[in-house]
Amino acid sequence: MSERATVQFKVNGKSCAAEVEPRTTLADCLRHDLGLTGTHVGCEHGICGACTVILDGAAVRACLMFAVQAEGAQIVTVEGLANGDSLSPLQASFRKHHALQCGFCTPGILTTAHILLSEEPDADENRIREVLSGNICRCTGYVQIVEAVLDARAAYKQKTAASP
Amino acid sequence: MKAPRFEYVRPTRLEDAIGALAKHGSDAKAIAGGQSLVPMLAFRLAAPRLLVDIGRIPGLNQITVGGDGIALGALVRWRDIERSDELRRAHPLLVEAVRHVAHYQIRNRGTVGGSLAHADPAAEMPGIAVTCDAQIVVAGVRGRRTIPAAEFFVAALSTALEPDELIVEVRLPPWPQGRRWAFEEFARRRGDFALAGVALFYDVGADGRAANAHVGAIGVGDVPLRLAAAEAVLERKLLTEPLIREAGAAAAASVNPADDIHAPGEYRRALLGVLTERALARAAGLPLRESA
Amino acid sequence: MTAVRTAYIGQEIERTEDFRFLTGRGTFVDDYEPAGLLHAAILRSSVAHGRIRKIDASAAVKMAGVHAVITAADIGQVIPTIPIRLAPIKGLELYLQPVIATEKVRYVGEPVALVLADTRAIAEDAAAEIELEIEMLAPVPDWRAAETDRALLFEQNGTNVAARYTVNSGDADAAFADADYTRREFFRAHRHTAVPMETRGVVAEWDAASERLIVTGATKVTFFNRRALAAMMQMPENAIDFIEIDVGGGFGVRGEFYPEDFLIPFAARMAKRPVKWIEDRAEHLQAVNHSREIDCELEIACRRDGAILALRGRIHGDMGAYTRTNSGVVPAKAAQFLHGPYRIPAVKFDVMAYMTSKTPIGTYRAPGRFEANFFRERLIDIAARDLNIDPVEFRRKNLIAAAEMPYSIGKLVPYENESAYDSGDYHAALEKCLDTFGWNEKKKLQGRNVDGRYHGLAVTCFVESGGAGPRENVRMILERDGRVTIAIGSSVLGQGLETVFAQIAADALELPFETFQVLHGSTTLLKEGFGTYHSRAVVMGGSAILDGAKNLLSAIQSAASLQFNCRPDEVTIDGGKAKGPDGRMLTFAALAAAAGAVSAEGTFANNKRTFSYGAHAAHVAVDARTGNVAVLDYVAVEDIGRAINPALVHGQSLGAVVQGLGGVFLDHLIYDANAQLLNASLADYLLPTATDFPHVRGVTLELHRSPSNPLGAKGAGEGGMVAVAATAANAVAAALSSFGVQPNELPLSPPRIWQLLRGAAAAR
């Protein structure tokens, strides 16, 4: 029980440590303590989904948990989706389908869609829309986002087929 | 929109968590998934001095299905329920209701215990607990006690929990084969709190008549409600369209929702009647003629 | 003009900006963190209308980590006010907003004090400790209360009615006196706003040694805002840089000058430290411009055959508590666009602007148009039904014909000249919309009850302006490495303009698209820029690029002539190469490597607006028992003259339609009778999500280029929005026609529709 706590977890495969106040959200910790500003904050009360990261294999809102709660977790942020400088199939599909405009909601949508397709590579349009209903986009009207996610399914199916 | 300052502990034993809550009384607050509490902290609607993170206490995340019913540990998450094949058979109404809880990301973190303790009158899990005569097992410094769901919810965002008490599990009675059921809610957008919702089930006797009818409602009072008047309409009756209409009218007549920014109370009342009809029609497998 | 080979214009080029956005490498304002930063939080009024009796920050200032608390007393004797940028309607200038509340507060959310602290959390802790005493005065919750002048927001002005004027064309009263048919209705568009996903933010850095200020997070109209700030801070304009980085959406609200745009730079100068303020979402919903709250009494006069003879009406604009930079646009355009795409011999509109104790009004995508189209198109459907004329036929009969272009609607805005629609085939757009939508096949569902859901169809027509003047500027630099930098005065708020501008330049210079880098918005780039609003960036900025490219080619000819030792006019340019009279040839890259960077400026000046136009169609199904409306199909057709990147235009169209549908069915800033905002959170302010409106389609036409700019482009950002309320509401009305329900008030929430139906049943 102290004013500040040290928290350690893995982000995008790398061990990270930060000294934070208990009230620091995971989103603020990632952004301001660890410099991973790809995770965006759009509402800070758990509605918009811009801050979605993958925590121990599940998409979660990084504004709805405190960094101290993530002690020991494995976290993937938007920065961890690309393979170096080459876009992942999902990212490339977003570019191809013009599934982003201002790009502010995009990190949360990518992390959400990535884990969805990893678990459910056959997700249909209804399922994709249902899952993405937790991510607000003001620019696109979602049509091109859904097209991009649908089109990216093939890459995840291959991955599923390849791994036993 | 930053949370007020608090201290944080993460006990790994239930007794330690209870001890911390007991010591700090109403200055302390338990956090599990945090999906209801953290927004309240962000808006500074709650300002506990201490957060007791119960998220890693072992043994509280079990789903147990047995002859005497179903037990859900307080830390069972919505995603666990959604993904449980066993529960889909053992309690389809629960699984269907949970599918309506908030959004994907929230369902990955939010817990059964958290929802019950938060006690939003429009939330699904409290509604299921009340509809299904659930027993809520809580632990505190004076030991464990079991609170019937009907007595657990005191008012909006207020429960029978003492400051030192934690929800350990919720028990749902067994779900017999052949039970008829439906869940219907109406929300402005998918994942929003319902303007009104109905959870109901009944068993079908050898004579084809409804028995043991349970009709529960969310979003139409300051706690989840059992609608005894609607249940009475159904009891020992064959479900027919006129009977369904009668039950819907009884449901609507038995609530008195308040006006709020999302809807006037009279709308919620009428909506509850419509949803009750639709839920009953679906449960009974009957078509329903719909007109204004 | 020389013919330009179009290799890139018209292509669906993938966006250059996407890589950084997709990999989390964009830089939005909160991503910028200079060393030594202080964080600001703002204490805002929780009272709608009151007199400040006491502000005591002594406890707050003493808290650990708190650097300063700034109130009006720290700003100086005279508190600066925010100037009007657009729509200087006479009277509005008496209601300007001071950058911080002094004696009075006039809306919930008005800044009262600013806290500087080591972290934002501490700043919020301290703001909560400031003792603020406000004597409550009677609130002015709406225009009807304002009109009575019982409680005055500005006592010195003696009234809450800030402006009133009448515009007309032809003799509407005479037309009404003689008409076969007239009908009058009252309509109401509700208060809602843009809500871009990134909230506003400012980082201000003060360099005490050089007395210079850098303001990061600027956008939209950076040069205007810099001028405004310089005046308020009594600094030379050139001592301030406004820097535009990535922006998470604007839609009209972001980038206007708000109180914080003064307070944060002022605080940085006072503290001699960089100061960051990031608006949180609850603040955003109270502080950012609200929009759309217009009531309208509208009356139509027709011949028996459906020919429109005249329109007249009155716009009641609820302006909120202050005039901000562009507040007047909303009621003024709501009046002007009542005319729409129809041949109407006479119109007469009164415009009233009232001050109320709510957040000030400003522009939101399709300002005034969304409202005006709703009012007019609803009335047209009502009139068509009264006259027993098919609503499509009614529109066909009255649409302005292609042969009538350009078509003057007269001077319907007091601060503008006469307006004339520039070009177009309005009938063709309507037919395209009907055809794409499948009107004839769907028509049989009109008004029918299918399994408890009542189906309704509607089609409406619109005209929309874009491309506001006066100018835009660009500098184009052929760099030594052969790349070309485009520095432009237009702002980029997420539309993909880096890509679009590069496409235009690539064609003009006949160079590969990858050659270009686009820098935008920042005041460091150019002497003067005009920014991005009123769907003007491509029209004005794109046209400036054509001029810049022409000038750059001349400069390249000059530079090459030195290399070739010939006259500049002897140098020919072809496909990115300069050729001398002796046959020697240099690629631009080789030329720049040899001769150094070559640069040129370009400008485009124009005061004629572009007028895009089109039609929208909707198919809805209304659950009459819950009042829920499902949008089963929605088609938006717009002729934008020329699409530089069709994929991006399509994205604008679809995004605007869904935003518009949100505005019809979901978005609503709800105030109570005390002018308290009741839903300052995204849990209660409902934005459309992926499950709400999945069936939207957009069709972009390029039938008629704009004659007023060399690209032939028309504004393309708002046409998807303008007719959504009109179309959706008409479809709902059509669905419920058997009940005689007239949805004349937005939003069309399930409870509202249910109440309308119940009212209709009771009336029968």
Image (spheres, rainbow, N blue to C red):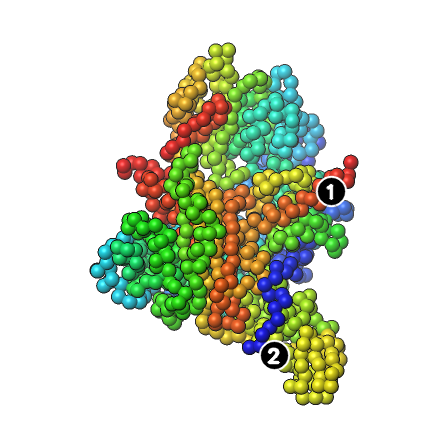
The answer to whether A69 is drawn above or below residue B176 in the figure is: below
Q: Secondary structure at mark 1?
A: helix
- Find residue B164 and report its image quarter: top right
Point out which mark residue C551 bears. Answer: 2
Q: Amino acid at mark 1?
A: Gln
Quarter the C terminus of chain C occupies: top left
- Find residue C345 and report its image quarter: bottom left
Name the outermost residue toward the front. C440
Looking at the picture, tell me which residue is in the foreground, C712 or A99.
C712
Looking at the picture, tell me which residue is in the foreground, B60 or C508.
C508
**Residue mark closest to the camera, 1 vs 2:** 1
Name the outermost residue toward the top. B206
Q: Is residue C51 left or right of residue B47?
A: left
User: Chain under label 1?
Assistant: A
Percent from the top left, x then y, of residue C679?
46, 46
Q: Which residue is mark 1?
A: A158
Q: Rounded to the nearest whole Å, what is the CA distance between mark 1 and mark 2?
A: 52 Å
The answer to whether C600 is drawn above or below residue C514 in the figure is: below
